[in-house]
Amino acid sequence: MAVSHRRHMLRRGTAQKHEALDATIGAFSSLQAYRSYVLGSARFRLPLEKTIKSRAPVGLFHGWHPSMISNAIRADLSALGLHADAAEETTEIATPQPEQIEDWLGLFYVLEGSSLGAKLLVKRAASLNITESNGASHLAVQAGNAANWSAFLGVLEAMQHLNEARMIHWANETFSFAHQAFETVMENNLADH
């Protein structure tokens, strides 16, 4: 695949928010921290995936569909003794509501890009003896889905006449939503940073 101009533009435009999210999540070098991470993941992904299922104009993306990991997250919550109901109580954080195509592309950039980070997170979870069968199935799904990331980049480059500043804005909005979803649960559960 050719170099993706828009991927690099989005990476540069979201670097600060992405770094803040990574710092909030930390290394999760303990079971307690990993459990907090999964709870934060649920608070981030479950409401967004609900919005995607009900509102995303997936027909506009040349046959590409976003990766959906809600079921795997719910399975991981259960495996770790956490309740999905608690995860879905997302305090007062308003779920982003994309409208235009650029909004959705910015949101999908963050969600699909998480498959790259999942490759590292799978290894961190494994160091705690957490695998696909006992609490890391959502990470395994993401880490094994590099093809969907590549397909998304193809869609991103193929789209014509996009407001790139708006895409960056919505990617940053999505990173901010993730940061808020993780921040409280990570701090409350004394996750390691």
Image: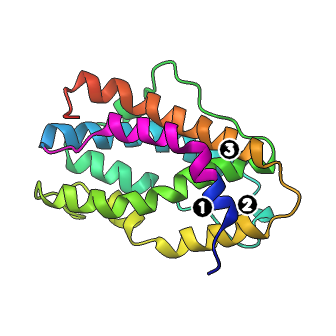
- Kindly give the residue lying farthest to the right in the view shown: 161
Is 60 or 190 nearer to us in this picture? 190
Q: Is residue 163 left or right of residue 14?
A: right
**Residue 42 x/y as whole percent:** 40, 41
Which is closer to the viewer, label 3 or label 2?
3
Q: Which residue is mark 1?
A: 66
Is 86 or 175 nearer to us in this picture? 175
Q: Earlier in the sequence, mark 3 or mark 2?
A: 2
Q: Which of the colour schemes (rainbow, by chain, secondary structure, one colour) is used?
A: rainbow
Give the spatial CA distance, label 1 vs label 3: 18 Å
Q: What secondary structure is found at the residue carrying circle 3?
A: helix
Q: Are marks 1 and 2 in contact (CB under 8 Å)?
A: yes
Q: Earlier in the sequence, mark 1 or mark 2?
A: 2
- Quadrant assignment, res 62: bottom right
Q: Is residue 137 above or below residue 145?
A: above
Quadrant holding the C terminus: top left
**Callout 2 amino acid:** Val
Give the spatial CA distance, label 1 vs label 2: 8 Å
Q: Which residue is mark 2?
A: 58
Residue at image position (81%, 45%) is 100
What segment carries the magenta color? 10-29
Q: Is residue 17 magenta?
A: yes
**Callout 3 amino acid:** Ile
- Whether residue 82 is visible, yes or no, is no
Q: Main secondary structure of the magenta part?
A: helix
Q: Which residue is mark 3?
A: 168
Which is closer to the viewer, label 1 or label 3?
3
